[in-house]
């Protein structure tokens, strides 16, 4: 009986992996140096989005000049992790137009591997083991087939890195709060800081982390001194990793404000209309972007 269950689990995992990879690799652009060849081969999406082209140009510059840039000054600005991953691909395979898409695909596959453990550890100790496994399957299955993840895992932009590092930061935080010691707290705080180098949407993650810490402190009924010590180590590690980016924005504040001011609206009617569109994008029409 146990052997049959194990074989069934392996078969289900292989089937889910096949679906996930199939959706991400179907008509995926092969490595080459000619954008015209991609258009002629019928790849999806056809050709490069301009943001993908910017990312490739940044990677070429980083490969040529070297050094570390906490923020990439091109277009409206770029967080660097995705670009450095493209740079690594260029260093290994040469300057191929599909480098950004390979980087995004790599981040997406890694995310599929960590979302299940995150779903389980979030409810460790509160749900029976079978229900934890079921949640892991649901979370992984949802990520495997949901359009947003499939789409951005095929597109050479930063969103896949954001999803992976956000998942990793939250997974490490849940792992750390169940140990309540300094080293896990420092590692988790560092990963939260690292997530900031993926995409500006990560700026909301500290709110999620604060809510997680508060919920854990209440549920586990931890001593106040232990909570404050854990939070202090977590915050210090987060601040240490974030320091290069903070110093950059202190020196060049216009880059911090450029993207938000470019999309900001002041009319109440526009705010209300955007709120309705955002809600519809989550549950009905999807994201036009």
Image (cartoon, helix red, strand yellow):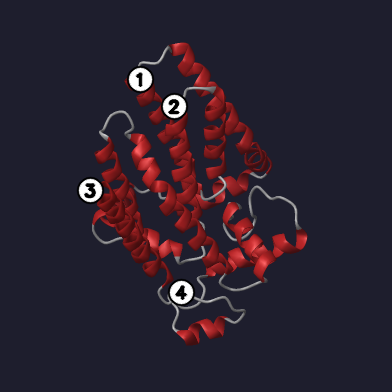
Q: Label 4's element?
A: loop
Q: Give the spatial CA distance, label 4 vs label 3.
A: 41 Å
Query: Which residue is tagged 2?
Result: 177
* Residue 77, percent from left and from top: 59, 55
Closer mark to the observer between disc 3 and disc 2:
3
Pointer 3 residue:
1
Q: CA distance from mark 1 to mark 4?
A: 47 Å
- Judge from the rendering whether residue 137 lies leftward or rightward of residue 55; answer left or right: left
Q: Earlier in the sequence, mark 3 or mark 1?
A: 3
Specify which label sits upstream in the sequence, 2 or 1.
Answer: 2
List x then y, in percent, for residue 275. 30, 49
Q: Which numbered dot is residue 220? A: 1
Which circle, 3 or 1, is nearer the viewer?
A: 3
The residue that disc 4 covers is: 28
Q: Secondary structure at mark 1?
A: helix
Q: N-terminal of the two: label 4 or label 2?
A: 4
**Quadrant of the rendering where the C terminus is positioned:** bottom left
Label 3: how many Cα within 10 Å (few below 14, some 14–19, many 20+): few
The residue at 70%/60% (across/down) is 62
């Amino acid at each position: 009986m146990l052997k049959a269950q194990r074989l069934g689990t392996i078969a289900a995992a292989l089937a889910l992996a096949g679906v996930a990879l199939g959706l991400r690799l179907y008509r995926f652009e092969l490595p080459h140096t000619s954008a015209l060849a991609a258009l002629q081969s019928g790849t999806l999406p056809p050709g490069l989005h301009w943001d993908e082209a910017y990312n490739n140009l940044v990677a070429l510059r980083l490969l040529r000049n070297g050094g570390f840039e906490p923020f990439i000054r091109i277009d409206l600005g770029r967080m660097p992790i995705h670009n450095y991953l493209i740079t690594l691909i260029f260093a290994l395979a040469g300057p191929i137009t599909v480098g950004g898409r390979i980087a995004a695909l790599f981040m997406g596959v890694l995310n599929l591997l960590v979302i299940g453990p995150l779903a389980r550890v979030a409810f460790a100790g509160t749900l029976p083991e079978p229900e934890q496994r079921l949640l892991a399957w649901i979370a992984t299955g949802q990520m495997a087939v949901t359009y947003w993840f499939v789409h951005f895992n095929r597109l050479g932009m930063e969103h896949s890195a954001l999803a992976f590092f956000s998942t990793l930061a939250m997974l490490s935080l849940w792992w750390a709060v169940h140990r309540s010691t300094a080293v896990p707290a420092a590692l988790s705080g560092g990963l939260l800081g690292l997530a900031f180098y993926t995409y500006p949407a990560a700026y909301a993650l500290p709110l999620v982390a604060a809510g997680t810490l508060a919920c854990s402190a209440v549920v586990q009924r931890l001593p106040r001194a232990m909570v404050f010590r854990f939070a202090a180590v977590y915050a210090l590690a987060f601040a240490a990793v974030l320091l290069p980016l903070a110093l950059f924005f202190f020196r060049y504040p216009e880059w911090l404000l450029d993207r938000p001011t470019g999309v900001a609206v002041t009319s109440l009617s526009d705010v209300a209309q955007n709120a309705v569109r955002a809600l519809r994008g989550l549950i009905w029409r999807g994201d036009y972007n």
